Image (cartoon, helix red, strand yellow):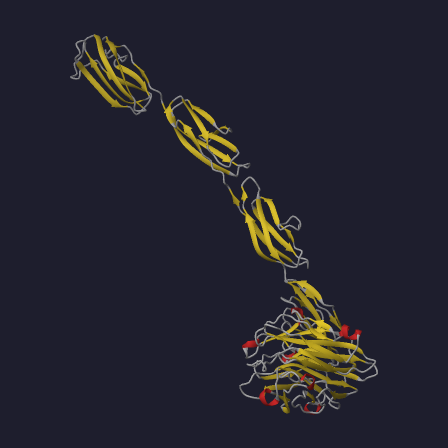
Amino acid sequence: MKRFVLHIALFFSFLVIRVNFVSAQNLFHQDIFYGGVTAGGFSTGQGQGSGTLNLYIEPGSTIRKAYLFSYRQGYAPAVPITVNSTPYVFDTINCVMTASHISPLVNPIKLYFKDITTDLNTVITSTFNITIPNQFGLPIGWGWFTAFIYIEYENLSLPKVASSLFINDKDFNGNESYSMAGMNPINTANPVGLSLMIDRACNNTNDGTIVTLNSNNLGIIGTPDAVNNLFSCSGTKGHFYYQNNTLFGLDDDTANNTMNGADALADISSYILNGSTGFTTNLNLNILGGDPNSNLLFINAYTTPCDTITTSIITDTVICKGDSIQLLASGGTNYYWLPATGLDNSNIANPMASPDSTTLYIVRIEDSLDCSRTEKVLVKVNEPPKISAINITPSVCGNDDGKIIISASGANSLQYSIGNGFQNSNTFANLSTGNYTLSILDNNGCSFDSTVFVPEINPVSALFNANPEIGVEPLFVDLNNQSNNANNYVWYVDNISFSNSYNTSYTFDSSGVYTIMLIAYNNLPQCADTFSLQIIVYDSLMIQIPNVFTPNNDGINDNFSIKVKGIKEISFSVFNRWGNLLTEYSNTITVSPTTIDLWDGRTSAGEKVSDGVYFYIIYVTDIQDKKHNFNGTIHLFR
C-alpha cells in the first residue's frame, strides 16, 4: 500500500470465498445469455465526494444481473455508499476478500459486494450518481473510497454474449501474476474484452501498473479516469459495454488491443488462441520502491460457440455454527464448488457443507460440451449463544437450595434450560447437588450446550458435652447438645441407639469404658456429622469384713479374708490387746471384685497366736484415689 495519503493501493481477494478453479484466479461470476455487459467505476482516491458514472444499457432490455462493489482499508466503520439516492451499507456477510498490503498503514483490505439486480430492474438507468461520504477522525489510510458497478442486461434481440468476472486473490506486493481459467471457449473472431478495475493509482510515471497478457505487453495504466479526475490517485477503471459481438469503450477507454494511462480496456483477441478457456496476466508496479496499486477486478466479455445453459441452485440459507446443510445445484454434467473448505465433496451437485463461518459458495456448472455458468448461494452461519459467566451457589445438604445464574449473549431473546424445558429467566433455583445439562437457545434457533455441576456443602456440625464424663456406677450422665445447622439427632451408646431427642441423658449401671456418639443431620441422613465422647464408669466402693476366723487348717475359714470392690490399693495391720503390732499387709488390687486373705493367725515371725480377740486397721484407696479406713475386732478360734 502507498506510504503517503495519495499512494494507497487496494487489493481484491475473498474473505469467505477463496475461489480457485484449477489454481486459477477467483471466478466470481460467469454466464452466457442474449444481451450485453457493461461496467465501470468511480473513486474519490482517498477522500470523499460525488461523481457521475455513465454506462450503457440497450433500450428494451431487462437487468439479468447487477453487482455493486466497494472496498475498505483498515478498520473503518461501515458507511453508506449512495448510488442514485439509494444508500448501500456493506457488512461482513457481503465480504468477499481479505488481503494484506506491503504497507501496514492500510491493513487489512477487504472487498464487499451487493447484488443490486432487483433495485436496478425497478428503475433501469445507465446513469449512476455516486457519493462517497466524509469519514472523519480515521487513521491515515483507513476508509471506504470507491464504487464499481457491473451489469448484465438481457435482450433477446441481441446475439449471445459470454461474461466472466474474476477477483484478485493476491496480497499487494507489486508484482502479481494471475491465471484466468474455467472460462467458456472463446471465439477470437470477435473482440474479447478485458476490463481492469484498479484504485489508489496516481499516474503512469509515479506509480502506474504494467499490464502483461500471455507475455504480451499491453501498456501502463494508472492515471485517474475522466469521470473521477477531480480526485487525485483515484486510479483507472476499464469502462465499457459489449453487445452485438462488439466491444465499446466508455469514458476515456478505447476498444483497441492496448492499455495506457486512464485506458484500462483492451481487446485481447489477438493474444489468445481461438477456443481458449483462459489466459494469464501480470500486473507489475511501474517503479521500484513504490507502493502497489489496488488491482481489483478482471472483467471479460466475449463471444463463445456455447449455447445458453439453464441452471439452478438452492436459495441462500442460514445454519448454526457446527451444523451442516446440503447444497444443491442442477442443470449440468460437472460441478466445481468453491471454496472446497467445509464441503464433503466439491465436485458433485449436492455436497454437504459444514462451514465455520458465513460463506458464499460459488459453483461452476458445466454441461457435456464443456460450457459453463456460475451460481451462488450464501450460507450464513450464525454464532451460537456465548456464555460470559455462570454463577453457581452450592446447595446446602438437605435443603436443595442451590442456584445457577447464567450471563450469556446472542441473538435475543435467549431461552434457558437445565433439562426440564426452556424458560426466559436465566436463573434456576431450589437445586439439589448434581450435574445439569445447560442449554441456551437464541432467536435464530442456535443453541449452546454444556454440563454444569452444582456442588454441595454440609454445614452440619455435631457437638455435645457430657456431665460427668467419669464416675462410679451407677453413673447418671446428662448429654447437652451443642450441634449447629441440624434438625435431626440420633444418640448411640456403643453403637446402640437410645434417643432421638435434642438433649438427653443416660445411666450407666456397670463399670466400663463406654462410647457415646451423636449423629446430627439436616433433613436427610446423608447430610450428617458425628461427634463422640468416652464415658468411664468405675465400680462403687464395697468392702465386706468378717468378725471371726478359724485358722485350724481344715480348709474352712482358715484366713482372715475380706471381699472388696472398687479399690485399687489396700493396707492392713493387726494388734493384740496390749496394742502390739502382730503383722501387717499391703497390696495393689488389679481385679475387682476380689477376695483378699489378710491374716493367717500368725505373727510376722511366723508364730501362732492364741485364741482371742484382736484389733485391726484397714486402709484402702478407691478407684477415684479417695482414701478410706476401716477398723474393728476379729475373733480367732482354732
Identity of the residue drawn at 63% across and 62% down: 383
Quarter of the figure that contains the N terminus: bottom right
Q: Is residue 130 above or below residue 462?
A: below
Location of residue 305 by image quarter: bottom right
Above-or-below relation of 624 to 127: above
Q: Is residue 596 visible?
A: yes
Please name the residue shown 61% across and 49% down the image. 427
514 lies above or below 366:
above
Of residues 313 and 61, the one nearer the viewer is 61
- Give how far across and how far down residue 537 sits, in percent: 38, 25
Q: Nearer the viewer, residue 534 or 287?
A: 287
Q: Is residue 288 left or right of residue 218?
A: left
Q: Quadrant of residue 67?
A: bottom right
> From the viewer's perspective, is 268 left or right of 245?
left
| Residue 611 in picture, x, y percent from top left | 20, 7
**What x and y, as percent, mark residue 420?**
65, 48
